Amino acid sequence: MMRIVNIVLIVLMLGAATWTYAVKYTAERRVAEIAELERRIGLEKETINLLEADWSYLSQPARLKTLSDLYGEELQLQQTEPRQIVHPQELPAAPELPMSDGVADIIAGSAPDPMTTGSVGGN
């Protein structure tokens, strides 16, 4: 009887050790994943800061004025007239798409023929 109890306890101890090892291994793997993600996030933040600095440099009014003076004639640049700036509600309405257009029919959900494809027919 004592031998059976010892065997059961040894099996339980081995099972607990295996489970503990599996949990430890999983936790270490998760910590490594978190460290990798934090490293990648830091790299992305550095990239964003670099791009913001580039944008700040590229959009400096003095630099843009110099480029405008240098390439204005070649690009036929003109000053913006106040009448060219409008509010969104002043824009004309979007044109109506004809329902005979295949794309418009698909968007509207009423395609004329489910077998219509863009392939060349060889009937």
Image (spheres, grey):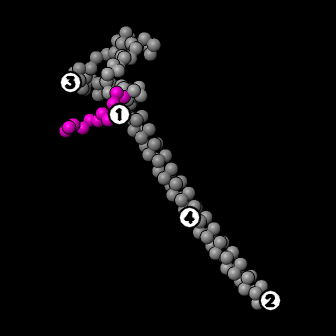
What residue is pinned by disc 2?
A: 1
Q: Where residue 104 sits in the image (x, y, percent)?
A: 36, 25
**Marks 1 and 2, the one that precedes in the sequence:** 2
Magenta-drawn segment: 111-123
What residue is pinned by disc 3?
A: 74
Q: Nearer the viewer, mark 2 or mark 4?
A: 2
Apparent side of residue 115 relative to residue 20 in the rendered image (left or right) = left
Taking the view exactly as shown, the residue that stands out farthest to the right is 1
Q: Say what secondary structure mark 2 lies in.
A: loop
Q: Nearer the viewer, mark 1 or mark 3?
A: 1
| Pointers 3 and 4 in contact (C-beta within 8 Å) | no
Magenta stretch holds residue 113:
yes
**Residue type, label 4:** Arg
Asked whether 68 or 37 is in front, the reply is 37
Asked whether 82 or 53 is in front, the reply is 82
Asked whether 28 or 109 is in front, the reply is 109
Q: Say what secondary structure mark 3 lies in.
A: helix
What residue is pinned by disc 4?
A: 29
**Marks 2 and 3, the one that precedes in the sequence:** 2
Residue 19 vertical placement versus 30 (above, below): below
**Gap between marks 2 and 4, in whole Å?**
42 Å
Specify few, some or many for label 4: CA neighbours under 10 Å numbering under 14, 14-19, or 20 or more. Answer: few
Q: Where residue 71 sits in the image (x, y, percent)?
A: 24, 26
**Residue type, label 2:** Met
Give the residue drawn at x 56%, y 57%.
34
**Marks 2 and 4, the one that precedes in the sequence:** 2
Q: Say what secondary structure mark 4 lies in.
A: helix
What residue is pinned by disc 1?
A: 114
Viewer can see residue 109? yes
Specify few, some or many for label 2: CA neighbours under 10 Å numbering under 14, 14-19, or 20 or more. Answer: few
Q: Picture quarter containing residue 27?
A: bottom right
Q: Nearer the viewer, mark 3 or mark 4?
A: 4
